[in-house]
Amino acid sequence: MQYSLAGEQVDAYRRNGYLFPIDVFGSGQVAAIRAELEQAQLDAAASGLEDEFSQLVRANAQYLLPFVYHVATAPQLLDRVESILGPDLLLWSAEFFIKGAHSERIVSWHQDLTYWGLGETDDEITAWLALSDVNVESGCMRFLPGSHHQKLLPHRDTFAANNLLSRGQEVAAEIDENQAVDVVLRPGQLSLHHGRIFHASGPNSSDQDRIGLAFRFLTPAVKQQVAQRDYAMQVRGIDAQQNWIHVAPPTRNFAPADVELYRRIRADQSLALAAGATQEMHAAY
Ligand SMILES: O=C(O)CCC(=O)C(=O)O
């Protein structure tokens, strides 16, 4: 594979639960992706989906927007992911994490796998692509090295309105912020993180939007254990286990049939995401 990770990088990922920065796209490619995102917003408005746009792209954007699928399947990403998860890969979700300039929006300390219904698996990874400057001022992610070696811990739901997570969930553990690592990325750089790593991010006090696009990849061995059905796109290799309903890539932005399918997928997945929640969730995941 042209973009495989070196053995030491894979070792560092397994030891720390993350790996960054990884150069993936140049400035021209990032500008093209940002232009696609702007076009998607216009297309959402033209389809009467303007008010829902930020929620629609906050999870499962790969089912609605062809460019998201194309970015997810670029060898620059998939070769890196294959170096860790192996040759058979599914894309479960693509999620824009956007914090506007001077936005108070944050992400509390959490473990991703808590409410996804996928169990404690090591066979899930997030590839988080920076589409803007991502630094301490603009609210980059912070990782707690090695915390993925722990099991999934209980989380408490805060439902805080400024939290980008659906339940404002917070891991019920003392976090030593001095041990945390700032995930500083330039536009076009990637970070990889494990589904059990403790991570968070702060507000954006910069003058620019902070934009990240997070892809959740699985191996076909992973199963949905809470919801009755779940969906994924096969992006590499084979799926011998067939635990997932396979979805084909979209052919244009917000095609009505895709939007309908998207709503069905979200409704099905919400059985896992909302399990045990005491209030209505305000965003996604
Ligand atoms: O983008 C952020 O600030 C947080 C993203 C995150 O929690 C994730 O990708 O798992």
Image: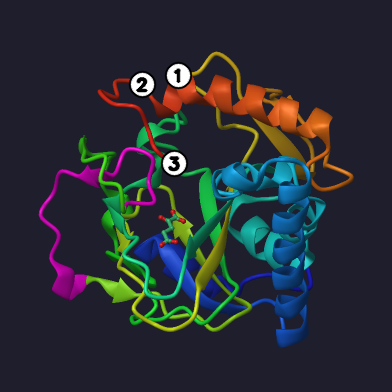
One can see residue 93 in this view: yes
Q: Amino acid at mark 2?
A: Ala
Mark 2 = which residue?
275
Q: Secondary structure at mark 1?
A: loop
Q: Position of residue 114 (x, y in %)?
A: 35, 37
Q: Position of residue 213 (x, y in %)?
A: 58, 61
Q: Quadrant for ligand 1?
A: bottom left
In the image, is 91 to the left or to the right of 128?
right
Mark 3 = which residue?
283
Q: Is residue 196 above or below residue 204?
A: above
In the image, is 247 to the left or to the right of 264?
right
Mark 3 CB within 8 Å of ligand 1:
no
> Outermost residue, top direction?
228
Q: Position of residue 156 (x, y in %)?
A: 19, 37
Q: Amino acid at mark 1?
A: Val
The residue depicted at 45 percent of the width and 33 percent of the height is: 116
Sequence-wise first label, 3 or 1: 1
Q: Residues within 10 Å of mark 1 (few under 14, many from 20)?
A: some
Q: Secondary structure at mark 3?
A: loop
Looking at the rendering, the stretch of residues picked out in magenta corresponds to 163-179
Give the position of the C terminus as an image quadrant.
Answer: top left
